Image (tube, helix red, strand yellow):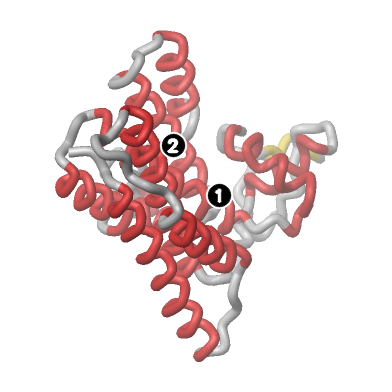
Amino acid sequence: MRPTLATSRVLFAVAVVVVAVGSAFIVRFGWQLTRLEVISGILALGALAGSFAVADPVPMTDAAIKRDEMLSQFAVFVAFLAFYAITAGSDVSPFNEQVRQAVAFIHGHTYIDAPQSFLEHAQIGPYSYALHPPLPAFLLMPFVAIWGMDTNQAMFSVLIGATNVALAWILLGRLEVKLNARIWLTLFFGCRTILWSETLFANTWTLPEMTAVTFELLALIELFGAARPLQVGVYAALSEVQPAGVEIGKGRCSLRGC
């Protein structure tokens, strides 16, 4: 069963409710709203209103079925963007190796400004180097080009997390999972796995793990779709250069297990 226009409307409505209720709590307790809560609320409200201007042809055409599928993908992204943004809070982690690396790239070098007191790094002579692969830093560069060191790595992680849930929704569609199961499995993936907490931590260690999941999902989507060898290989390679492993000594596990 394919997602319908009603499926997307429900998801957009849920996003609106999450933002409204969550924002009320945030204001009530004197916390600070972030840009993403506002953006996700506007996107959800606008898409919900716009969906009522769309008509379903009878019988359904291939174009209408494709439209509903793409709209549902966007609806899942917006719903989880709202959910993660509301639950993330506005705190900025000082463990922002990827932002520091992106700043370094923009300034034409690879060494980073790494405070000795709390940020782990490799010290070679007078220079400090990041320990993790550079893909998240490359993805952060457009944001760092605008906001510099004020770039909020946590908000970027929320974008990545919401993208991952939307990609899981797409993958389940490629696997031809029934709609009810697809909805519940997507909710489980986004709310009941370590993805939620890893998205919200948004620090030196968790952000590379989240970007690894992104490219793992892209590889699987391609594999169960057109299965073009080059695309599968590129996505798989990009996922494997991210440290999505486990740190036993610190008692931490990733999406790949413990």
Left or right: residue 124 compared with residue 254: right
- Please name the residue shown 47% across and 69% down the image: 86
* Circle 2/circle 1 CB separation < 8 Å: no
Name the residue that disc number 1 marks: 204
207 shown above or below 240: below
Left or right: residue 140 compared with residue 189: right
Q: Nearer the viewer, mark 2 or mark 1?
A: 2
Report if residue 147 is visible in the image. yes
30 shown above or below 160: below
Report if residue 165 is visible in the image. no
Residue projecting furthest to the top: 229
Q: Residues within 10 Å of mark 2 (few under 14, many from 20)?
A: many
36 shown above or below 142: below
Q: Secondary structure at mark 1?
A: loop
- Please name the residue shown 58% across and 33% down the image: 135
- Please name the residue shown 43% across and 54% down the image: 51
Q: Secondary structure at mark 2?
A: helix
Residue 10 in the image, given as x and y percentages of width and height = 31, 60
Q: Residue 36 lies in what quarter of the image?
A: bottom right
Q: CA distance from mark 2 to mark 1?
A: 17 Å
Numbered mark located on residue 214 in the image: 2
User: Observer-nearest residue: 72 or 224?
Assistant: 72
Residue 250 in the image, given as x and y percentages of width and height = 39, 53
Q: Residue 220 lies in what quarter of the image?
A: top left
The quarter of the image holding the C terminus is top left
250 shown above or below 210: below
| Residue type at numbered disc 2 | Thr
| Residue type at numbered disc 1 | Thr
- Please name the residue shown 15% across and 46% down the image: 181
